[in-house]
Image: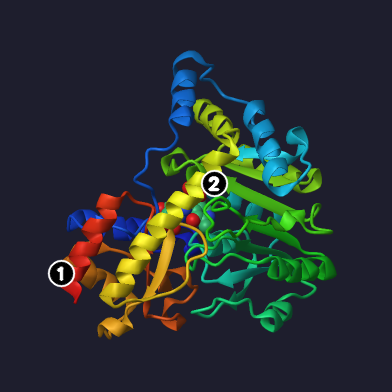
Amino acid sequence: MKPANTLMSGLGTTVFEVMSALAREHQSVNLGQGFPDDRGPQAVRQAAADFLMTGHNQYPPMMGLPELRQAVAEHARRFQGLDIDWQAEVLVTSGATEALADCLFGLIEPGDEVVLIEPLYDSYLPIVRRAGGIPRLVRLEPPTWRLPREELAAAFGPRTKLILFNTPMNPCSKVFDEEELAFIAGLCREHDVFAVCDEVYEHIIFDDRRHLSIMALPGMRERSIRIGSAGKSFSLTGWKVGYVTAAPDLMKPIARTHQFMTFTTPPNLQWGAATGLRLDDGYFSTLATDMQRKRDRLAGALSTIGFDVLPTHGTYFVTTDFRPLGFNGTDEEFCHHMTVKAGVTAVPVSAFYDDAGKAPRNFVRFCFCKNDETLDEAINRLRDKLK
Ligand code: PMP
Ligand code: GLN
């Protein structure tokens, strides 16, 4: 038989699936893969349920339901001050995962260079490479994860087509500040480069920080692509409803890709997401403060148990160094050990690097978007079994 695509055949199973399967096998508390215990806002689920029973459950328009695209544009105005034409500049996708693939397949020409920031979300590199892009990786270093400006500038050149980055950032929970975004924006303008910004955690942000979209910076409106996800903003990760915002010229190839990837997304879920994006400011601020309280509960306990806990400015995740506990193996070995011996599962941070062998091997990521009982059960198990 002829070989299948070598790049895709050579991939392993994603770390989230691997760790969730391990957690199931050992009946472990799963603080690995990021999904909330919360059921999501009642109004959003009710809107989707009503639409399912009474609405038009046939193919919605390829670009997405007008109501959701309008809601995406209104939401961008409310939170980012952006003036978006919902008809020409908003596309609904089956999750941010599809949105990312549509952007990368739609924008990259084989041989183009793509700047990425490590540690990175696990879908980025395979799709960049499958699209023919040549990754130029710039690494952030713990514990501050500060942007190394000289290295970033050196990664940009005449062949750079786009930069893809994520803020608030999974897994390291960094939030890019205005100066860092302005620096990236300056490089994009200087080298005529697009910025694809994965903003799925835009509302999961802590300690009075405010999410800033690079699209809102001077000169970036026409060269930025902004990606959001109802999964994260409404604690409904299984819904897989995402949205892309981009100027019409950029939107065109992205939408052309979407039409042959999925063409569309379930209409009742789109309707629910539109209801969600129109919830009042109080919903979004409560989401952030609730999540911040969970961060404090888990981070404080992990620190007492002996982990070195890194700062968490946003997302569902806290990154910890387990070396102070006296474990000298790799992060993968630690996650396995913790699952089997303590019944708690996390994710090894080296999975978020191109080459795990060259990544730091002493960090694991815990997910805190869980109810108090789940967090306390995990904490008690770790306290009893790890000390
Ligand atoms: N980007 C990042 C940084 C994520 O953490 C996730 C999922 N957790 C996604 C994209 C994918 O989002 P979705 O589930 O909407 O496809
Ligand atoms: N984004 C989630 C995480 O980082 C997982 C998403 C997935 O399983 N594909 O945990």
Choose top left, top right, bottom left or bottom right for residue 87. top right
**Residue in view at x 44 percent, y 44 percent:** 237
- Element carrying mark 1: helix
Q: Quadrant of the C terminus?
A: bottom left
Label 2 – label 1 distance at C-alpha? 35 Å
Q: Residue tagged by mark 1?
A: 384
**Residue 50 in the image: x percent, y percent?**
46, 19
197 or 100, nearer to the observer: 197
11 or 268, nearer to the observer: 268
Coloration mode: rainbow
Q: In front of the other: label 2 or label 1? A: 2
151 or 183, nearer to the observer: 183
**Residue 71 in the image: x percent, y percent?**
65, 33
Q: Quadrant of the N terminus?
A: bottom left
In-image side of 123 versus 183 (left or right)? left
Mark yes or no: residue 211 visible: yes
Choose top left, top right, bottom left or bottom right for residue 364. bottom left
Q: Residue tagged by mark 2?
A: 285
**Residue in view at x 55 percent, y 67 percent:** 174
- Element carrying mark 2: helix
Q: Up-down: is 203 above or below 183?
A: above
**Residue in view at x 63 percent, y 37 percent:** 259
Disc 2 CB within 8 Å of nearest ligand 1 atom: no
**Residue in view at x 32 percent, y 49 percent:** 371
